[in-house]
Amino acid sequence: MKKIIFFIIAISLVTIQNIKGQKDQTTTYYLIRHAEKSRADKTNSNPNLTEIGLQRAQNWAKVFKNVTFDFIYSTNYNRTIQTAQPTALSNNLEILFYNPRELYNDEFKIQTTGKTVLIVGHSNTTPQFVNKILGIQKYSDIDDTNNANLYIVTLKDNSKSDILLEINYN
């Protein structure tokens, strides 16, 4: 009987510690739209970045130089992958792909809890992703000429905070 009581107490303490550990975790998401894409071929649904876009991708890596990412996600398009690549290289990470039709699903939440994550998307999916994380409709689609938005969303305990920055390079 003493062994059973000890076992129950031990399991309870481990469970309480696990719940406390999960509660104290901070999750930070950095979300950006892909850099400038080539518009030379209007029929191309998967264009590469322009020279300016490639430079912006390098600049994003500089912006994030003091951020240690645990994961870097991108949609599976040339422009988003090319935008994420310099930051992934500087963090020695592989780019993981997400389905833009399944934003912030349960699997994604579990995998990224307590982590620092970069997510590269599109003019519509990036603000939609932020809204999904926040649980409210706060941000609208990004103008097609805007490649400078940086959304930072932080989750800690039961609170959520967000900020939208515009990072331009001339």
Image (cartoon, rainbow, N blue to C red):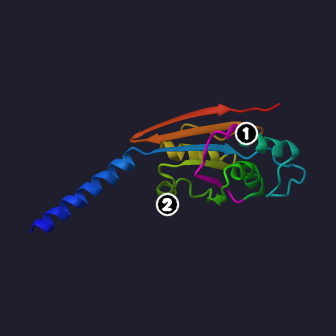
Side of 138 relative to 3 (left or right):
right
Magenta part of the chain: 62-76
- Amino acid on which the number 2 mark rests in the picture: Glu
- Amino acid on which the number 1 mark rests in the picture: Lys
Q: Is residue 63 magenta?
A: yes
Q: Is residue 10 magenta?
A: no
Quadrant of the frame with the N terminus: bottom left
Residue 52 or residue 90, whichever sits in front: 90
Quadrant of the frame with the C terminus: top right
> Pointer 1: what residue?
62
Numbered badge on residue 152: none
| Rendered location of residue 4, percent (x, y) | 14, 67
| Between discs 2 and 1, the one toward the N terminus | 1
> Pointer 2: what residue?
107
Image quadrant of residue 102? Answer: bottom right
Q: Residue furthest left?
A: 1
Q: CA distance from mark 2 to mark 1?
A: 30 Å
Side of 70 relative to 4 (left or right):
right
Up/down of 92 relative to 160, above or below: below
